[in-house]
Image (tube, rainbow, N blue to C red):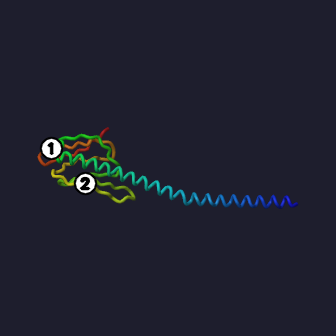
Amino acid sequence: MSNVVSLKDMVSRSLEKMMLVAVGLTTAVLVGVPVLLYAMNTVNNATQIETAQVFAEQVHDIVNSTDCGITNDTLVEIEVPSGVSISASGSTLTITFQHDMIQTITWVETYTSTIILIPPESAGAYNLNVVKVNDGELLVKFIALS
């Protein structure tokens, strides 16, 4: 009879241990998954911001080189990231990055020449053509690659 009682106690203790493990694993999943998803979202947002920043720097560098007279006509293949919009007013070129849940970021440069802009229609691959068209005017044109 003592063997049966001790077997019953062993089964009971094993069940208790399994329940503790199950509760521990459930807690780890309930806490860990949202933290992991938040971390992945943060990394994704940082990557998108970095991509937009690199794009803005490239565009401003190309426009600046033509504005300074280093070149009169530049044609470069460039990838326009999603969430980026470009506008011009007078001699100021503005590149804006806006995405869900991320604060809007703007890169603004003012040049000596007036900017005539033909902006990209959407994200994707483009040829960026910057041409000094008249004295004091730059044509900044995005030509979609099909």
Amino acid type at mark 1:
Val
Residue positioned most to the top = 146
Q: Residue 105 is drawn in which quadrant? A: bottom left
The residue at the point 21 percent across, 44 percent down is: 130
Please indicate whether residue 2 sits to the left or right of residue 109 in the image.
Answer: right
Q: Residue furthest left?
A: 135
Please report the residue visible at 83 percent of the width from the left and 61 percent of the height from the top.
5
Q: Residue at x 35, y 60 (%)?
A: 103
Check the image and name the residue furthest to the right.
Answer: 1
Label 2 with label 1: CB-CB less than 8 Å: no
Which element is circle 1 on?
Answer: strand
In the picture of the structure, the residue carrying the numbered disc 2 is 94
> Which quadrant would the C terminus be assigned to in this image?
top left
Residue 84: where, in percent of width, then height? 32, 51
Q: Which of marks 2 and 1 is nearer the N terminus?
A: 2
For disc 1, the marked residue is: 133
